[in-house]
Image: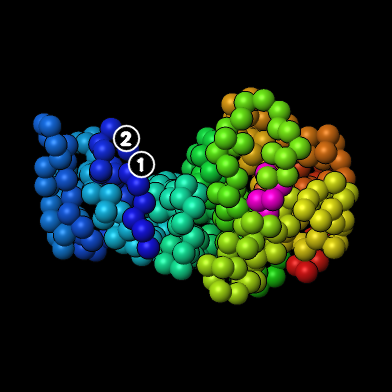
């Protein structure tokens, strides 16, 4: 696997690592440096005890690692996630903050580098999402701690993590089916937009309206993402259809195939809803972030017919928005969401 490029331009050739991310790693996987004077200075050597290093860390100063060591650190962070999520000695919100930061650190390159979805990169991605899915499946308090922790900015990898977390929460509440099916939603939700890596930067960054050709390129990301995952795995994993179908809409207005209603798998419909909800509740360069209430109203009324009303109401109910949408839960039947994924 190729090492990814540095993510902190202030320290060319190095990547910063907040000390808290290292707390649950048993052995330092690479050298740690700190920035002193004109260049980074070695602070702790590979093989050392991270606990001791953190204890004497200088306050507020992030550690640095060489960018060529980034994959070693990603592997160690991914392996530490189950320990972070299961650490009952600290509060759910503190656990989820650290877990979210680790997930963001490990997964960011996946959405930046075209060549990252190789076999090793995908194995690490899977390990991170399976740890989070398992942690959230076993502990409802952790779901809400993760939702409270979410970063709402325009970065693709945080949108991907948020989509996966909302997806796990909704899939768990339906219920969608087996833990395997919910893990599929977590992975499908995480990598649903991976095909955007294939869309030229100039198109993604274009300030004005897209022309027909540019729209075709953007719309191609669903099929491109499906193909990328099949190529990385060597076969279509059980959640691959979520990537291909996440822009299909129940009224046939979606793409790439313009499918309708139940011809779109239930887990794809579910990811489409949480994907749209996170996008609408995140600030974009051209519009403010909507509140959860406004986003759900828009999805139910302004985009009427595009999403399963049952699923949107189930999601609103889950987020505590049922009453806010004008329904009195005690006076109406809760949504029946017992169909299984196709
Ligand atoms: Fe998409």
238 inside magenta stretch: no
Q: Residues within 10 Å of mark 2 (few under 14, many from 20)?
A: few
Q: Position of residue 72 (x, y in %)?
A: 29, 60
Q: Residue at x 30, y 54 (%)?
A: 70
Q: From the image, which quarter does the N terminus lie in?
A: bottom left
- In the rendered view, tell whether residue 38 sits above or below residue 31: above
Q: Which residues are magenta?
A: 218-222
Question: Of the numbered discs in the image, which one, if any, rests on residue 132?
Answer: none
Q: Residue at x 49, y 43 (%)?
A: 149
Q: Please tell me whether residue 121 is drawn above or below residue 20 in the rendered image.
A: below
Q: Residue at x 60, y 68 (%)?
A: 230
Q: Is residue 157 left or right of residue 173?
A: left
Query: For numbered disc 1, what is the local secondary structure?
Result: loop
Q: Please rate how many residues cluster around mark 1, counting C-alpha atoms within 10 Å: few if below 14, some from 14 to 19, many from 20.
A: some
Residue placed under numbered mark 1 in the picture: 7
Q: What residue would you read off at disc 2?
A: 9
Dot 2 lies on which element? loop
Q: In the image, is 39 to the left or to the right of 229? A: left
Query: Is 64 placed left or right of 333 in the picture?
Result: left
**Looking at the rendering, which quadrant does residue 37 occupy?**
top left
Location of the C terminus by quadrant is: bottom right
Residue at the front extreme of this rendering: 213
Q: Is residue 103 visible?
A: no
Q: Nearer the viewer, residue 341 or 59?
A: 341
Q: Which picture quadrant has residue 171?
A: bottom right
**Is most of the magenta stretch helix, strand or loop?**
helix
Across the whole image, how many numbered discs are drawn on residues? 2
Picture coordinates of residue 258, whole percent (x, y)? 84, 53
């Amino acid at each position: 696997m190729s090492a990814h490029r540095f993510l902190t331009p202030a320290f060319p050739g190095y990547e910063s690592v907040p000390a808290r991310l290292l707390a649950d790693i048993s052995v330092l996987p690479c050298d740690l440096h700190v920035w002193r004077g004109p260049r980074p200075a070695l602070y702790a050597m590979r093989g050392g005890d991270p606990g001791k290093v953190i204890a004497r860390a200088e306050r507020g100063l992030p550690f640095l690692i060489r960018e060529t060591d980034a994959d070693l650190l990603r592997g160690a962070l991914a392996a530490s996630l189950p320990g972070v999520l299961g650490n009952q000695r600290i509060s759910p919100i503190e656990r989820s903050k650290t877990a979210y930061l680790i997930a963001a650190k490990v997964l960011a390159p996946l959405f930046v580098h075209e060549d990252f979805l190789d076999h090793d990169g995908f194995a690490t991605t899977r390990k991170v999402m399976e740890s989070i899915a398992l942690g959230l499946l076993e502990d409802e308090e952790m779901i809400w701690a993760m939702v409270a922790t979410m970063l709402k900015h325009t970065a693709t990898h945080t949108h991907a993590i948020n989509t996966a977390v909302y997806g796990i929460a909704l899939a768990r509440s339906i219920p969608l089916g087996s833990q395997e099916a919910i893990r599929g939603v977590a992975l499908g939700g995480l990598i649903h937009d991976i095909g955007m890596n294939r869309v030229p930067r100039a198109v993604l960054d274009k300030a004005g309206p897209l022309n027909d050709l540019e729209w075709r390129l953007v719309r191609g990301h669903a099929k491109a993402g499906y193909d990328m995952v099949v190529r990385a795995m060597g076969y279509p994993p059980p959640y691959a259809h979520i990537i291909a179908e996440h822009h299909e809409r129940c009224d046939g207005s979606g793409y790439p195939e313009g499918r309708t209603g139940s011809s779109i798998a239930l887990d794809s419909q579910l990811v489409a809803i949480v994907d749209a909800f996170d996008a609408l509740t995140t600030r974009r360069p051209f519009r403010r972030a909507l509140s959860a209430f406004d986003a759900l109203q828009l999805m139910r009324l302004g985009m009427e017919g595009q999403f399963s009303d049952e699923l949107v109401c189930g999601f609103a109910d889950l987020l505590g928005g049922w009453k806010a949408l004008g329904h009195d839960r005690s006076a109406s039947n809760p949504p029946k969401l017992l169909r299984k994924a196709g």
